[in-house]
Amino acid sequence: MPELPEVETIARGLAKRVTGDVVQSVWLGQKEEPLKSPSSAIAATLEHRRIVSVRRMGKHIVFDLERDQVYVTRAPAKRRRANRKPKEAQTSSTAQATAGGGARATQVPYAQWVVHLGMTGRLQVCEAQSEVVKHTHAILRLSSGRELRFVDPRRFGRLSVAQAGDFDAAGVEPLEADLESFLTLFRGRKTPIKSALLNQKLLRGVGNIYADESLFRAGLRPRRRTSTITRDQLARLLSAIKEVLQEAIALGGSSISDYVNSDGEEGFFQLQHRVYGRESEPCLVCKTPIKRIVIAGRSSHYCPKCQK
Ligand SMILES: [Zn+2]
């Protein structure tokens, strides 16, 4: 299952490829599971929209959409011309296009396409004539002549639209959390710290692997009761979480295209794990065998000597 760093990498790869492109038409498959919004609502929201940005929110990929000017037929002619002028004057630089988009956002209806990849979902950007592979559930035809396709063999992925552009994933974004908000999230909780880290209502998108790796770097045992962890230790934990996620994102940055276009499930990069999946192997710091325990049904790995 793609974790936060993989989703971030995929979102960045998609942003490079499809920002500025316009969705001309949408085809949706018959399988109901991947469609969290009604298919008619998805199609109506996506068609004739320009993709102004693609970004990650938690483990969701969010496409920010604005109505494409070409299709705004009801606007008075004068106003339309006024809108078009600054746009033509602009170069194709993304930065400038984004700056211009900000000014227009108040006039132009704004919406979002929200994709969760689930276990096996992937988004492909391909030429229209490329073969449509099995388990394709959505095809967005783009004005560039390419297609953006959602493929998901196991159908745990989810597609939805936020028609008012107000999608909000629960929880705090770990890479943006400051110490005070992080402390507030965890203060007084009686659950094991590992469970608290996996609680998506607190932190967005920290999965099992990155929780174990962060706890190792912070020197905290996964079963440690959250309320007994000191402020300094929580500060170290927040730094460790950011460090681990950023390292993984940096590793993924060099091979973005593989994640977007690959037809196989493999290709997700992996951090050099220090504890995750290393049960009985020597700790890289002190050589004590790594232990594996189960907390809330999930495997947790730690060094009994380095982590308290
Ligand atoms: Zn150790």
Image (tube, rainbow, N blue to C red):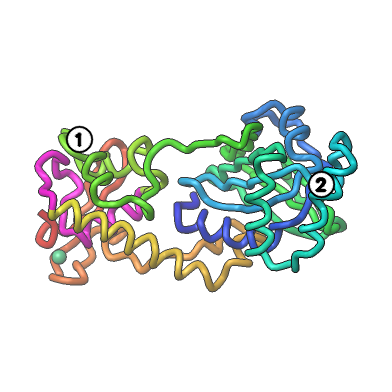
Q: On the rendered structure, is 73 left or right of 49?
A: right
Judging by the rendered image, the residue that carries numbered circle 2 is: 69
Judging by the rendered image, the residue that carries numbered circle 1 is: 191
The amino acid type found where label 2 is placed reads Gln
The amino acid type found where label 1 is placed reads Thr
Q: Nearer the viewer, mark 1 or mark 2?
A: 2
Is residue 219 on the magenta stretch? yes
Instruction: Write down the quadrant of residue 199 in the picture.
Output: top left
Magenta stretch: dominant SS? helix
Are the residues at dot 1 and dot 2 in contact (C-beta closer than 8 Å)?
Answer: no
Look at the image and give the residue range highlighted in magenta: 208-231
Instruction: Write down the quadrant of residue 45 in the picture.
Output: top right
Does the numbered disc 2 mark a residue whose Cβ is under 8 Å from ligand 1?
no
Instruction: Judge the density around disc 1: few (<14), some (14-19), many (≥20) Cα neighbours within 10 Å.
Output: some
The answer to which of 185 and 214 lies nearer the viewer is 185
**Ligand 1 located in image quadrant:** bottom left
Q: Secondary structure at mark 1?
A: loop
Quarter of the C terminus within the rendering: bottom left
Q: Is residue 173 visible?
A: yes
Instruction: Find the distance from the CA under tag 1 to the CA under tag 2.
Output: 51 Å
Measured as percent of width and height from the top left, residue 67 is found at 76, 42
Q: Give the residue at x 12% y 46%.
A: 229
Q: Give the residue at x 20% y 68%.
A: 282
